[in-house]
Image (cartoon, grey):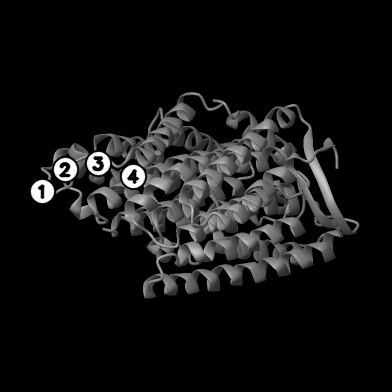
Amino acid sequence: MENSVFSYLPLAAVLISAVAVVFIILFGSRPNLREAVTLAAAAGKLAIVFSMLATVLDGKYPAITLFSLSPGVGLALRVDEAGLIFALLASALWLVTSFYSIGYMRGSGEKRQTRFFASFALCLSATIGIAFSANLLTFYLFYEILTVATYPLVTHKGTPEALKAGRKYLVYLITGGVILLAGIAYTYQVAGTLDFKPGGVMPDTVGISQLAVLFSLFLIGFGFKSAVMPLHSWLPSAMVAPTPVSALLHAVAVVKAGVFGLVRAVGFVLGPETLAQFGLAGIMSVVAGFTVVAASLLAFRQDNLKARLAYSTIGHLSYIVLGLSLFSAAGWTGALMHIFNHGVMKITLFFCAGAIYVTAHLQNISQLDGIGRRMPWTMGAFTVAALGLAGVPPVAGFISKWHLVAGTLQHQQFVFAVVLLLSGLFNAGYFFPIVYRAFFKQPAESLHSGEARRLMLVPILVAAGLSLLLGIYPDFLVHLYNLAESAARQVIGGIG
């Protein structure tokens, strides 16, 4: 493919955590060694992914083909701007989450910790495979591995509630996978290739009926993992899992794999210009806009802190879907940036929820009176991330939302501009009462005093600090804005 340079680095980034799974299992009876392997693999993965940043920014794309089945079909990896954004998010947050998970698992006394860390490593291997897939076949392979690898994490507690949530998770996501497979097979029949190409691979002869079928299959297939309504109910149910798993589901891997699948389907398979020509963008915009509003309203009704965060995630994922549907350069830039920014802010909130659970044994918002006075650093970080999700500067969420709103105005989609602005008010409405309750109400005398252990608190502060840094300087360290703008420019081309 154009501008590809042969490199083993994409394969190494995928394999390092897969190899770590073996050693995590071998050292299962020696927790310190097991956790050292986890941290080493996480640091190694981040280093490998980060090492490709300069090359990609220079317009060259590390790639490797493992084998070809036929022209346009094979197992291949290729690192481009969009994939690197997702991979940087996953690898950076895996390292932070690994430290947090060690503190959480020790503090909460969870059982089956070896299985937990092994499944986590396998999930991150699959996630990087998704990010660096060069075609739909490779993408689908890693996409389904991620589904299966996450199941032991959802059912980790082994309670009837956890097992029920796990069954629901599998039913929903395997159904989505089957629909997606049909879309992939039909893509090959129509286009004769499964490769990803900026602007799409559809032939000039494609008809409206063919494109409508493909668009529907991809929107529904990826819609399950993206938790667009009404395909979302597995996600709140999965909150029964330990908090690091919730963070993985919401900020790093599973739901982000769904929206990233839509990035690939819309921008690199079907093509925005082709979809715009036949007027299919409006369906995606309406679905996303409805989900943003409905999920926000449902969030108000949740007293359980993780459940409220879950519905917030459903809404913010549809920010990304809405941005992709706008077919404007600003909308795509905002959507790609929000994949990263939302991940950092949302993982901060879940880390805070886990710290409160482990130290104060509280799960409901109505129990959090005065918790900010006992855990000021934790709730200070919570406040920063909540401000960001509401779109308040200078936190990272403001930058992505600015571009998303600009994207709606670029094509005079004023209704969706209003949806995005209203959603900011909704976010403030369901997050700020938590902050008020935490800092301005008197704590109960029996309320636990003190912060969580350092292995949990430091990752919370790092994630919150990164949320602020990315809001003040969007190109901080990972060149997020440059990557997003470059990817958007290639995909949108002349229609942006």
In the displayed structure, does residue 290 sit left or right of residue 48?
left
Q: Residue at x 73, y 52 (%)?
A: 277
Residue 421 is marked as: none
Front disc: 4 or 3: 4
Q: Secondary structure at mark 1?
A: loop
Q: Which residue is mark 4?
A: 352
The Cα atoms of the two marked residues, 3 and 2, are separated by 9 Å
The Cα atoms of the two marked residues, 4 and 1, are separated by 19 Å
Sequence order check: which comes first, mark 3 or mark 1? 3
Q: Amino acid at mark 1?
A: Ala
Sequence order check: which comes first, mark 4 or mark 1? 4
Sequence order check: which comes first, mark 3 or mark 2? 2
Residue neighbourhood size for the residue with mark 2, other residues' Cα within 10 Å, grouped as few (<14), some (14–19), many (≥20): many
Front disc: 3 or 1: 1
Q: Residue at x 72, y 63 (%)?
A: 214
In the displayed structure, does residue 296 sit left or right of residue 369?
right
Q: Which residue is mark 3?
A: 435
Q: Which residue is mark 1?
A: 444
**Which residue is the extreme one toward the left?**
445
Residue 494 visible to the viewer: no
**Residue 238 % position (x, y):** 43, 64
* Quadrant into which the N terminus falls: top right
The Cα atoms of the two marked residues, 1 and 2, are separated by 7 Å
Front residue of this view, candidates 19 and 65:
19
Residue 231 visible to the viewer: yes
Q: Residue at x 26, y 48 (%)?
A: 359
Front disc: 3 or 2: 2
**Residue 405 % position (x, y):** 50, 38
